[in-house]
Image (tube, grey):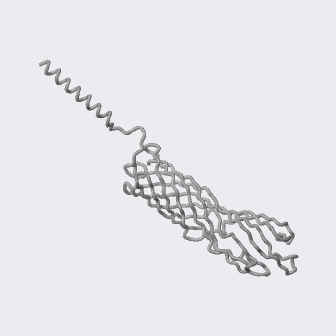
Amino acid sequence: MLQRFLLCVFAASVAVALQADEDVLRPKGRPESWTGPPSRGLIRNPWALGIEVGGSLSLFGQDVTQYQAPTYQSNLTRGSGFGPLLNLAVDYALTDALGIQARLGYDQKHFTTSGYLDSPCETPPGSGFFIPTRVEHTRSQTIAYWTGGIALRYRFEENWVVLAGITYHSRSNASFTETDSITSSTCQFYDDAGFPIGQRRQESGSNTSAFNAARWSLDLSVGYRIPLSENIVFLPRLAGQIFLNPITGDNLSSGYHPVLGQIYAFTNRRLHALQLVLGVWFNL
C-alpha cells in the first residue's frame, strides 16, 4: 500500500516538473521587450495618440510674362526653402490593417526666389532716356498656417504604413525680405520722396494679406513603424503635399513702369511641399 502511494506521488511530481519545463520553453506571459506586430491598430489598442515634429521643403513656382522683350529677362520662376511643422494626431483602427487619422498642427512654409531683372532705367531722371539695367533680386517669404487634416491609414508588411488624405491650411501670418542690387550702369534707387538711396535697397515687413487665407492640399505619405515598447511606437514618414489652389493671386502691378507701362507680370503662383515627419505614438 505504501509502495503504491509513493509511486503515485512520484508520478505527480514528474508531471508537475514537465509542465514547469513547458512553461519555461513556452511562457504564457508577455515578453519583456515587445517587437511584434500589433494585434489591432497602429500600436496594439484601437486608439493611439501621436505627437509629430518635422520640416517642410516648400517648392514654389510661377509663370513670368514679358511685355518688353528682349529688354527684360528673368529667372525668378522657381524657389524653395525649409520651414518647421508640429502636429497633434489621433488614430483609430477600423480593422487590423486599416485605420483613420485626424490631426491638428502648425505648418510654416518658407521659400526664396533669386535671380536677375533687366529693367529700363531712366537716366538722368526726367530725361525720358532709358537704358537696360540689370538688377540682382532676392525675395524670401515665410507664411505660417494652422492646419487640420484627416487621412486613411493602411498598414502592410507588419510595419510599413501608407496614409492618404486632405489637409486644410488657415493662414496665420506672413512676412518677407526683399533685396535688390544694381549690377550694371550707374543708375540708382530712389526713395518715395525722390532722393537717391544708392544701388542697393532692402525692404522687409509683414505681407499677410498678400496670400490666400485658406488652402487645401492632398497628402500622401509612407512611413515605417519602429516599436519602442509594448505601448509606444516611433513612426518616421515622408509625405508629399499637392495644393489645390494657388498660394497667392497673380501679380500684375509689380512690373508696371510709370512711363513704359506694363513690363512683366507673375501669374499662376503655386506652392507644393515635401515633408519629413517624425512621430511618437502612444496607446490610449
**Near-viewer residue (114 or 27):** 114
- Considering every residue shown, the one lying at the far front of the view is 70
- Tell whether 5 sits left or right of 64: left
Residue located at (38% from left, 57% from top): 94
- Tell whether 265 sits left or right of 246: right
**Near-viewer residue (200 or 96):** 200
Residue located at (80% from left, 81% from top): 259
- Considering every residue shown, the one lying at the far left of the view is 1
**Near-viewer residue (136 or 43):** 136
Q: How many marks?
A: 0
- Tell whether 267 sits left or right of 200: left
Where is residue 179 shown, x and y percent of the image?
76, 64
Tell me the quarter of the picture where residue 152 sits: bottom left
**Near-viewer residue (224 or 231):** 224
Residue located at (50% from left, 59% from top): 221
Is residue 8 depicted above or below 230 in this figure?
above
Where is residue 83 shown, x and y percent of the image?
62, 57
Where is residue 187 shown, x and y percent of the image?
84, 71
Where is residue 21 shown, x and y percent of the image?
29, 31
